């Protein structure tokens, strides 16, 4: 037995050699499965051993196990559990049973309809399959009968079928022979009737057979007759083709028939293009005649329609027919056609550009854009057929050039409108005033100019926007989506006009002549305010409107709004400064004439005011300012300077005191920048005027009364001028310089008493 056991457990023994083979294999399979699970979940042997063991699947007391035994389970409970636990287990088990029953009932109720439907379906399928089996049996029986009948019929008619097939072949051959024998007469009749296409088809059907059996005398004779007739047919087709009286489709048919008759393709290709050139040149001559001085040329839309339907349509027909007829020519033939189309297309484009040039003077773009759209659309077909000729690209270039020219035209129109507005302003300023009727003020003129320019800009934008409309065929081209919008409209038209407007306005600052030429000062003031308004809001509004209407898809650099605003502000500043200079020069001329035409040495004692200025309308004066100004001329320093008794060194002391005063006095910038307000403008004019008065006084010699007259005039000026300047100390200092300069140039500098000066000015 030991030997048997040893043999049974040896590696060479099989499962059948062991008395417990099946029982030993089951644990082995479970161990393998258990090991694969451990490998899948990444558990080592130690981790698996350290975990609590699960329930034994062979345990008969496991309620959820496959080997559950109720008797063993009850025996175990009676042995191990007290009475109370037994009662609890019973209660729990009853509860679980009821729950399971409830779930089972719910499941049955929920799927009852499905169960019923499935049962009906199965029953119906059984019935259908029974019927189908019966029908299939009947069909099989019928097919067997049919097969039997077919076999018997085929056996009966086999001999007749073979004879019928032979007879049919003989009949077809006889018909072909009959056709061959009748071929010369048929060809002759077709030629006489002009049915050239039918004749060529007959010849094509018989040519291969005649060529194959030409060694037979009868077929040779037929072939010779057909060749004679075919030669006459080819001659008539060539004559018809060369006459050119028919249209392009008929001529293409002639070429096609000649090619079918075996005529040389190269020669036919040259003749075809020559005849096509003649027809297309006739269309070009017709278009050129419309551009002549008489009769008047039609509008541009009619011209492009005529060219599109005549020349472009004819070119399309020629290209399509050429490609269909001479496709065997290969690249050489395609290049020949492209050169042909390129030459004639360039002449057509030249005529179109001449006609479009006549439209550059018009202001309405709608008709021009419609004509360009039709011109561009018409050339799509030949552009696709003749890509190598570049007709579509050339047409697009023409449209782009016209668009650029229109932008330049609208820019010139805006400049002309701006100059026209300036002319209207000049006329309004120079128009004589009717008694009792006031002319338009500067504010009204400014509003009219601004609104007129803005309306012209909007009209120009609306006109050029037609080039980018969605319904226009060329609007989707890269130029009209990029460069046209950014560099053409924004930079070329809008920015170009704004800069041109600023340059035109600045040109008034460079007018020759001491008085600023013939430019009215009010025009300078109006232009300055216009440029300032543009800097404040108008430039930003116009560029925003442009960017919204023309969606720029170009990355090219554009002029920033801030740069344009800075240029407009600088222009406004220059105009305002020039206005101040011009007005100051006008007043300076008045002062200069007044000072130079008077004999200041023999002047009478001043008793009134008005030698230099008219009084005009007096405003309410400030008593403080009046007294303060007067005290400048009546201070102890002035009294000391104009003391009636002088020592021999008194003149030297006076000059020394004057020079010391100039060193420590604040320097006055006469031509300082002008701010954009009324006070700054008036201050600039007053500074220039008083500086001119000072320089004129330095060139004259004054007597005692002349000095007193200057003293009275300066006090009178101070009474009225202080309220118009930003800093009244400027008036005080300049008038003080005038009186001091007059005193230095007076041999007998005896000033008038301040109280007397006041009385004279109040009485005047």
Image (cartoon, grey):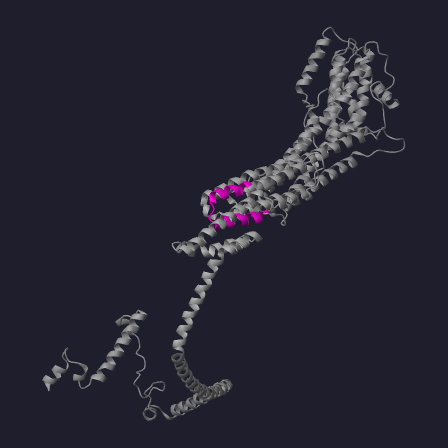
The percent coordinates of residue 155 (x first, y second) are: 38, 80
Q: Nearer the viewer, residue 501 or 317?
A: 317
Residue placed farthest to the left in the image?
3
Residue 32 in the figure: left or right of residue 107? left
Q: Main secondary structure of the magenta part?
A: helix
Q: Nearer the viewer, residue 259 or 324?
A: 259
As drawn, 255 above or below 751: below
Residue placed farthest to the top in the image?
648
The quarter holding residue 379 reads: top right
Q: Nearer the viewer, residue 275 or 114?
A: 275
As drawn, 18 above or below 612: below
The percent coordinates of residue 205 (x first, y second) are: 47, 57
Residue placed farthest to the right in the image?
436
As drawn, 711 above or below 247: above
- Residue 714 forms part of the magenta stretch: no
Total label count? 0
The percent coordinates of residue 600 (x first, y second) are: 81, 11
On the rendered image, what quadrant is the C terminus found in?
A: top right
Say if residue 740 shows up in the picture.
yes
As drawn, 489 above or below 219: above
Q: Kindly identify the residue that appears in the image at 73 percent across and 26 percent down.
A: 580
Q: Nearer the viewer, residue 327 or 45?
A: 327
Q: Kindly identify the residue that appears in the image at 70 percent across and 9 percent down.
A: 652
- Residue 260 forms part of the magenta stretch: yes
- Magenta residues span 247-274
Residue 261 in the figure: left or right of residue 373? left
The quarter holding residue 722 reads: top right
On the rendered image, what quadrant is the N terminus found in?
A: bottom left
């Amino acid at each position: 037995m030991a030997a048997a056991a040893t043999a049974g457990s040896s590696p060479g023994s099989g499962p059948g050699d062991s008395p417990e083979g099946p029982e030993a294999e089951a644990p082995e399979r479970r161990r393998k499965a258990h090991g694969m699970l451990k490998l899948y979940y990444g558990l080592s042997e130690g981790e698996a051993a350290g975990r609590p063991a699960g329930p034994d699947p062979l345990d008969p007391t496991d309620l959820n196990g496959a080997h559950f035994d109720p008797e063993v389970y009850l025996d175990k409970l009676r042995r191990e559990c007290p009475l109370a636990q037994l009662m609890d287990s019973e209660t729990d088990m009853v509860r679980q049973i009821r729950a399971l029953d409830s779930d089972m009932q719910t499941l049955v109720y929920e799927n009852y309809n499905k169960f019923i439907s499935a049962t009906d379906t199965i029953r119906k399928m059984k019935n259908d399959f029974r019927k189908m089996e019966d029908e299939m049996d009947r069909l099989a029986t019928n097919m067997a009968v049919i097969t039997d009948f077919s076999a018997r019929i085929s056996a009966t008619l086999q001999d007749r079928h073979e004879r019928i097939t032979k007879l049919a072949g003989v009949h077809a051959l006889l018909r072909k022979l009959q056709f061959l024998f009748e071929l010369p007469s048929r060809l002759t009749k077709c030629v006489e009737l002009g049915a050239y296409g039918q004749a060529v088809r007959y010849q094509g059907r018989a040519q291969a057979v005649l060529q194959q059996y030409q060694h037979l005398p009868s077929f040779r004779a037929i072939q010779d007759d057909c060749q004679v007739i075919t030669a006459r047919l080819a001659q008539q087709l060539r004559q018809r083709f060369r006459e050119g009286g028919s249209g392009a489709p008929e001529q293409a048919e002639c070429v096609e028939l000649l090619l079918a008759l075996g005529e040389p393709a190269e020669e036919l290709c040259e003749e075809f293009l020559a005849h096509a050139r003649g027809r297309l040149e006739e269309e070009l001559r017709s278009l050129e005649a419309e551009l002549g001085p008489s009769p008047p040329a039609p509008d541009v839309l009619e011209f492009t329609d005529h060219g599109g339907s005549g020349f472009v349509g004819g070119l399309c027909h020629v290209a399509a027919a050429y490609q269909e007829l001479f496709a065997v020519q290969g690249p050489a033939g395609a290049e020949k056609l492209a050169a042909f189309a390129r030459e004639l297309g360039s002449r057509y484009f030249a005529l179109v550009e001449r006609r479009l040039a006549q439209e550059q003077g018009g202001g309405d773009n709608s008709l021009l854009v419609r004509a360009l759209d039709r011109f561009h659309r018409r050339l799509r077909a030949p552009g696709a057929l003749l890509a190598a000729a570049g007709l579509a690209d050339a047409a697009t270039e023409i449209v782009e050039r016209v668009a650029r020219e229109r932008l330049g035209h609208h820019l010139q129109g805006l400049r002309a409108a701006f100059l026209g507005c300036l002319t209207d302003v000049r006329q309004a300023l120079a128009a004589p005033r009717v008694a009792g009727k006031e002319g338009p003020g500067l504010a009204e003129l400014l509003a009219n100019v601004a609104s007129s320019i803005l309306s012209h800009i909007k009209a120009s934008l609306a006109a050029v926007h037609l080039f980018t409309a969605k319904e226009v065929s060329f609007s989707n081209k890269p130029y009209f989506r990029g460069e046209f919008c950014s560099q053409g409209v924004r930079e070329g038209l809008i920015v170009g006009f704004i800069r041109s407007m600023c340059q035109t306005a600045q040109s008034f600052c460079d007018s020759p002549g001491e008085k600023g030429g013939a430019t009215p000062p009010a025009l300078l003031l109006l232009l300055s305010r216009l440029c300032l308004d543009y800097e404040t809001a108008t430039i930003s509004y116009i560029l925003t409107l442009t960017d919204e209407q023309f969606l720029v898809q170009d990355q090219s650099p554009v002029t920033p709004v801030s740069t344009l605003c800075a240029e407009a502000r600088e222009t406004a500043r220059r105009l305002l400064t020039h206005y101040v200079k011009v007005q100051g020069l006008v007043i300076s001329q008045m002062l200069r004439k007044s000072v130079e035409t008077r004999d200041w040495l023999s002047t009478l004692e001043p008793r009134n005011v008005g030698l230099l200025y008219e009084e005009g309308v007096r405003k309410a004066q400030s008593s403080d300012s009046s007294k303060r100004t007067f005290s400048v001329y009546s201070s102890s320093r002035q009294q000391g300077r104009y003391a009636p008794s002088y020592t021999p060194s008194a003149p030297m002391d006076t000059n020394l005191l004057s020079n010391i005063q100039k060193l420590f006095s604040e320097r006055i910038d006469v031509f300082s920048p002008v701010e954009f307000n009324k006070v700054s403008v008036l201050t600039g004019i007053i500074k220039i005027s008083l500086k001119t008065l000072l320089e004129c006084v330095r060139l004259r010699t004054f007597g005692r009364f002349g000095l007193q007259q200057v003293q009275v005039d300066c006090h009178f000026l101070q009474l009225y001028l202080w309220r118009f300047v930003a800093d009244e100390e400027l008036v005080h200092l300049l008038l003080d310089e005038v009186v001091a300069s007059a005193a230095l140039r007076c041999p007998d500098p005896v000033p008038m008493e301040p109280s007397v000066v006041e009385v004279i000015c109040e009485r005047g």
